Image (spheres, helix red, strand yellow):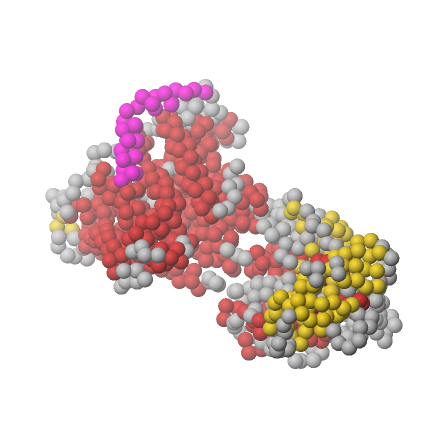
């Protein structure tokens, strides 16, 4: 891949990167603040995009309620949600194709939502690419530059570089109808990036691709974003995709933000039952906390939480067959109901003495039968807020 | 998948009917153009090019043809100028009222041609609505003569008739422009006018070609409006044909002119189709 | 510059002159029709401004006018007969174009659709020559044949569009369950085409009632309504014409409203007339 060809338009700083694996999580579930880079002047105070109390209704239908979110410079933020969650609407409001019913959006401290889309330093990669069928690949990619009246020579050079970056140089003279879906997607990307926007919006751009191509593009997009240093806001309904690509995930549910956190945190410390269930698999344990002990049917463990009803998320991979002496772990017996072979791991459903059913994920083994002794550590039972049904 | 009997049943009857009532008559038209009419008003089946020679030798025929083409060209131009912005407005600006407005455009199409042409006659006449209105508000003292029984009246009436015809394909092609392309163009920095010029208009050209063809071809062959409103200076080529089949009684000559018109129309249709294909991007 | 409200079905900010142009064009399109209706009540007859002496006189004269009503009857007979012919041949034509391959298919398609765009005079004249050569006298029958032929294209176009929307799998399911081609046609294909056929019938009927170019050459002793009006126009304008024209307009309105409502219903789109 051509390096450094599309220089970021950021004001002379290396964009901050949240190191992938170094996030520390504390047992009480508090979120970890961003780890700063060596550059001390890099502060979260200079958010690129500020979304403040944005709401949107279509007629009587309230699609977005009170969304407040910040996008940092050079960040890869994914807005994740089911269909109908409002994620595409939010994206379109940022792009300028819909006007918000309430709230405001600021970029670099100035009002963005007052500007028409053709005045915003924001570009979009559309879900079905929206390539101009009557223009060639080169003309498509150079469209934005031509509008801004860039001199011919410079325009040609930048278009060339953009095509090289997406590896589509041999197709320069083709029309969109002559290239495949995956290739169209790259052109759509090039067409947006060549304008050096401050923010790139991507509306489920990979949803029309087949699984293998999708995985490949996920990697390429992520690498490209690091390369180019522009903030990406990526919309998808695929939680695996979100976890692979993002610096942070904003989970949207029925028009409200459920949780905004880096992938590891949102996976290990989900804030609500919905989050726990939407991202990955989980067991939801309902019970009560009294006098420092959490009790969910036949299971109990010590906890520092206050008294009251409790809901806990326990990931299947955190339940394992009991080994060695019982220490601080919670032990119980379970009768095996069902097992599903997934290659390297198996998903086993067990039933406990009092009828409680749990799933566990563990390394594959030939013969599972009857009852097994299982254990998990209390730290892995993450307290979550219940998610109410919303109107 | 379909049996031979089924396929025969759906192809043969229409083929037969079309052959008998379309192909054969056109062929007859062709044959008639080579025959002659005797002084005693009998059609003589002798084969000659005399009729065609007459078309080119006697000036009035070519003159009228060119005048007709001029009128048709003007009707086409005005229809496009009226129809395109209207279609654009409906497609991109009308929002929820789009369907209702569309029906409003279509309704005049369903009102009898004769009725509408006649209405223009009452409006444009020296005793008509327009003239008496102008005198009533003291904008003119004498009736304006050129309003009626002139090429102006024919062009006006035909424009009125054929603007909805031009509108339909233009509106259809504009509706087919994906809205995401408009948004993409805005996203890349183009203003609404630039978007129209660089994206919307190029993609609507096939509709414009179709609309222009409708307006031109149908105006060219029109004989009712000239008869009602054209006067001596507004005679069109079809009027000559009508009189040749009527009082002037020279069917073969009339057939020759008709056949030329048919050939011209077919050529225009062919041209229009290839233009549409060339500029269509699917 | 402030950003006006935009949305998916209105992707551009409002314009200043486009609505004005639209209003002007609508005014132009409806001016003759409105004039007609207003002046059908004008006591002073045709023309003149402003209209005065509101009266129903012309309508009264109209209803007593036998010639007009017999021509209306003729027109309706012709329209029904033409409808029958156009559908009888247009439906198979649409089916043939949709699913059969035969030599000369391209030519057939063009030929069937030609009368739509060809000036009526050519179709009318060529049919006139046919009838003359085979020695058939001009009458309502020849008009029926003329309309039927010219309007096959309307039937074919509408039914073809309906066929495109038809799910082929339904017919395959019918065959799979044991019905033969004819049974499938009657029980599955035709019911699905019902709306297209009704729409086509309505359109053909209305067009036939208004048809004048082809009828002009094929008319015998009995007049159709347009030709009856035409004859009177040659002799001089009478305000009765305004009256009958207004009535025709109202019927056309009703016909198109029905046709459009049918089509909208078929697409499952909400009916925005209400």
Q: Is residue C258 visible?
A: yes
Q: How many marks?
A: 0
Seen in the picture, residue C67 relative to A83 is either above or below; the reply is above
Q: Residue A71: where, in percent of width, then height? A: 76, 63
Q: Is residue C35 left or right of residue C4?
A: left
Q: Who is closer to the viewer here, A356 or C47?
A: A356
Quarter of the figure with residue A263: bottom right
Residue found 82% across the figure and 57% down from its top: A289
Residue C243 is situated, as x and y percent measured from the top left of the image, at 39, 27
Q: Residue A30: percent from the left, percent from the top? A: 83, 63
The location of residue B5, given as percent across then percent down, is: 24, 58
Range of residues picked out in magenta:
C54-81
Image quadrant where one finds the N terminus of chain B: bottom left
Q: Is residue A158 above or below residue B153?
A: below
Q: Nearer the viewer, residue C38 or C156?
A: C156
Judge from the rendering whether residue A342 lies leftward or rightward of residue A314; answer left or right. left
Mainly helix, strand or loop, the magenta region? helix
Position of A197 compared to C11: left or right?
right
Q: Toward which corner of the image does residue A28 lie, by quadrant? A: bottom right
**In the image, what residue occupies the spot 52% across and 71% down?**
A180
* A351 in the magenta segment: no
In magenta segment, residue C72: yes
Q: Is residue B162 above or below residue A306?
A: above
């Amino acid at each position: 891949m051509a390096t450094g060809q599309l220089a970021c338009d950021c004001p002379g700083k290396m964009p901050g990167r949240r190191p992938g694996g170094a996030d520390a999580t504390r047992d009480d579930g508090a979120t970890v603040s961003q780890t700063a880079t060596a550059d001390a002047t890099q502060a979260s105070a200079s958010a690129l995009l500020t979304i403040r109390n944005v709401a949107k209704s279509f007629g009587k239908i309230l699609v977005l309620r009170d969304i407040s979110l910040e996008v940092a410079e050079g960040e890869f933020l994914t807005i994740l949600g089911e269909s109908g969650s409002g994620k595409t609407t939010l994206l379109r409001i940022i792009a300028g194709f819909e006007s918000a019913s309430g709230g405001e959006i600021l970029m670099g401290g100035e009002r963005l939502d007052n500007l028409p889309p053709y005045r915003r330093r924001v570009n979009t990669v559309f879900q079905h690419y929206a390539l101009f069928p009557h223009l060639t690949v080169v003309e498509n990619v150079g469209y934005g530059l031509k509008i801004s009246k860039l001199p011919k020579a410079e325009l040609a050079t930048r278009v060339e570089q953009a095509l090289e970056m997406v590896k589509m140089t041999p197709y320069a003279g083709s029309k969109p109808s002559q290239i495949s879906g995956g290739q169209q997607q790259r052109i759509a990307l090039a067409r947006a990036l060549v304008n050096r926007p401050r923010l790139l919006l991507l509306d489920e751009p990979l949803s029309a691709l087949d699984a293998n191509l999708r995985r490949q593009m996920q990697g390429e997009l992520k690498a490209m974003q690091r390369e180019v240093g522009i903030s990406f806001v990526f919309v998808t309904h695929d939680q695996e995709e979100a976890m692979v690509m993002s610096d942070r995930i904003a989970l949207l549910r029925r028009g409200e933000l459920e949780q905004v956190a880096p992938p590891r945190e949102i996976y290990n410390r989900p804030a609500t039952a919905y989050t726990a269930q939407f991202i990955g698999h989980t067991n939801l344990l309902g019970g009560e906390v009294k006098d420092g002990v959490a009790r969910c049917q036949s299971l109990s463990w010590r906890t520092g939480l206050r008294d009251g009803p409790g809901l806990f998320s326990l990931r299947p991979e955190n339940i394992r067959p009991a080994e060695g002496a019982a220490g601080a772990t919670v032990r119980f017996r379970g009768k095996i109901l069902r097992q599903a072979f997934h290659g390297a791991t198996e998903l086993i459903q067990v039933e406990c003495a009092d009828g409680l059913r749990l799933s566990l994920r563990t390394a594959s083994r030939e013969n599972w039968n009857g009852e097994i002794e299982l254990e998990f550590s209390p730290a892995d039972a993450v307290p979550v807020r219940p998610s109410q049904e919303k109107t | 998948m379909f049996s031979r009997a089924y396929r025969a049943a759906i192809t043969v009857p229409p083929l037969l009917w079309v052959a008998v009532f379309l192909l054969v008559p056109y062929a007859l038209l062709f044959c008639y153009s080579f025959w002659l009419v005797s002084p005693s008003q009998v059609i003589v089946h002798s084969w000659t090019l005399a009729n065609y020679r007459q078309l080119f030798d006697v000036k009035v025929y070519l003159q009228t043809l060119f005048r007709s083409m001029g009128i048709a060209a003007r009707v086409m131009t005005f229809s496009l100028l009226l129809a395109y912005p209207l279609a654009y407005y409906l497609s991109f600006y009308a929002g929820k009222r789009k369907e209702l407005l569309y029906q409003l455009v279509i309704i005049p199409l369903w009102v009898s041609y004769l009725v509408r042409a006649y209405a223009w006659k009452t409006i444009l006449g020296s005793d008509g609505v327009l003239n008496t209105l102008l005198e009533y508000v003291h904008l003119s003292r004498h009736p304006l003569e050129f309003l009626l029984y002139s090429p102006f009246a024919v062009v006006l009436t035909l424009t009125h008739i054929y603007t909805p015809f031009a509108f339909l394909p233009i509106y259809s092609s504009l509706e087919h422009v994906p809205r995401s392309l408009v948004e993409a163009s805005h996203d890349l920095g183009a203003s609404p006018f630039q978007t129209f010029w660089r994206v919307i208009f190029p993609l609507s050209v096939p509709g414009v070609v179709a609309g222009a063809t409708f307006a031109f071809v149908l105006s060219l062959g029109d004989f009712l409006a000239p008869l009602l409103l054209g006067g001596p200076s507004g005679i069109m080529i079809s009027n000559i044909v009508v009189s040749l089949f009527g009082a002037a009684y020279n069917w073969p000559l009339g057939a020759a002119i008709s056949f030329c018109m048919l050939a011209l129309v077919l050529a225009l249709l062919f041209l229009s189709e290839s233009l549409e294909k060339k500029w269509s991007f699917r | 510059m402030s950003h006006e409200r935009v949305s998916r079905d209105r992707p551009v900010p409002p314009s200043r002159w486009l609505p004005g142009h639209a209003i002007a064009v609508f005014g132009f399109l409806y001016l003759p029709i409105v004039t007609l209706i207003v002046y059908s009540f004008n006591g002073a007859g045709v023309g003149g401004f402003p209209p005065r002496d509101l009266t129903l006189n012309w309508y009264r004269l109209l209803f007593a006018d036998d010639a007009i009503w017999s021509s209306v009857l003729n027109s309706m007979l012709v329209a029904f007969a033409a409808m029958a012919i156009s559908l009888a041949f247009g439906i198979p034509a649409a089916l043939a174009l949709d699913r059969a391959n035969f030599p000369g298919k391209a030519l057939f398609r063009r030929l069937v659709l030609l009368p739509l765009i060809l000036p009526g005079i050519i179709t009318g004249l060529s049919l006139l020559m046919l009838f003359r050569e085979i020695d058939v006298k001009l009458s309502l029958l020849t008009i029926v044949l003329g309309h039927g032929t010219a309007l096959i294209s309307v039937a074919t176009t509408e039914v073809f569009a309906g066929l495109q929307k038809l799910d082929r799998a339904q017919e395959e399911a019918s065959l799979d369950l044991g019905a033969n081609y004819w049974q499938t046609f009657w029980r599955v294909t035709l019911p699905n085409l019902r709306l297209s056929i009704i729409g086509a019938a309505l359109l053909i009927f209305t067009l036939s009632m208004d048809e004048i170019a082809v009828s002009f050459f094929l008319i015998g002793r009995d007049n159709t309504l347009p030709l009856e009006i035409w004859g009177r126009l040659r002799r001089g304008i009478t305000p009765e014409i305004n009256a009958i024209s207004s009535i025709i307009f109202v019927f056309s309105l009703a016909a198109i409203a029905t046709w459009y409502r049918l089509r909208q219903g078929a697409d499952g789109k909400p009916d925005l007339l209400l």
